[in-house]
Amino acid sequence: MRNEDIIELLEEQDLPEHFQIVAETCGIETARILIKELGGITVSIPMVNSLRSLIERYIKENIKEIPIKKIARELGMNERAVANIMRKKSLKIDNGKKF
């Protein structure tokens, strides 16, 4: 029996405990694909607040419609951190005030 065939027999309880969360969250088929295609590779899954370009783009796209306080809360940041990003990117809010 080939590895690909054996992987198809894989069930959640066959997985190491730390990998069962992948099967629970993404489905057993996704877990099988990851094992088949990426087996042996260590992967670090980023938290949203570490995805800098996404955060900057979100702020840029929403700053005119959503108050800074709400954006900060949605991103799990404080208002000053949002304002600092705006300042670095020279973003303006609707009253024309430049950060």
Image (cartoon, rainbow, N blue to C red):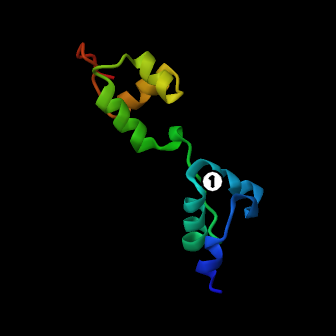
Q: How many marks?
A: 1
- Residue at 58%, 73% in the rendered image: 36
Identified at 73% across, 62% down, the residue is 15
Kindly state the secondary structure of the residue where label 1 is placed.
Answer: helix
Residue toward you, 37 or 32: 32
Residue 87: quarter of image: top left
In the image: residue 83, left or right of residue 63 = right
Is residue 64 at least partly visible in the picture? Answer: yes
Point out the residue furthest to the bottom here. 1
Across and down, in percent, residue 75 comes to 49, 29
Seen in the picture, residue 47 relative to 14 is either above or below; the reply is: above
The residue that appears at 61% across and 55% down in the rendered structure is 44
Q: Amino acid at mark 1?
A: Val
The residue furthest top is 95
Residue 79 lies, in percent from the top left, at 47, 20
Q: Position of residue 10 (x, y in %)?
A: 67, 67
Q: Nearer the viewer, residue 88 or 46?
A: 46
At horizontal 44% and vertical 16% (from top left) the residue drawn is 69
Q: Quadrant of the C terminus?
A: top left
Percent across and percent down for residue 7 are: 63, 73
Quadrant for residue 19, please give it: bottom right
In the picture shown, does residue 37 fall above or below 60? below
Residue at mark 1: 22
- Please indicate whether residue 30 sits to the left or right of residue 17 in the image: left
- Quadrant where the N terminus is found in the figure: bottom right
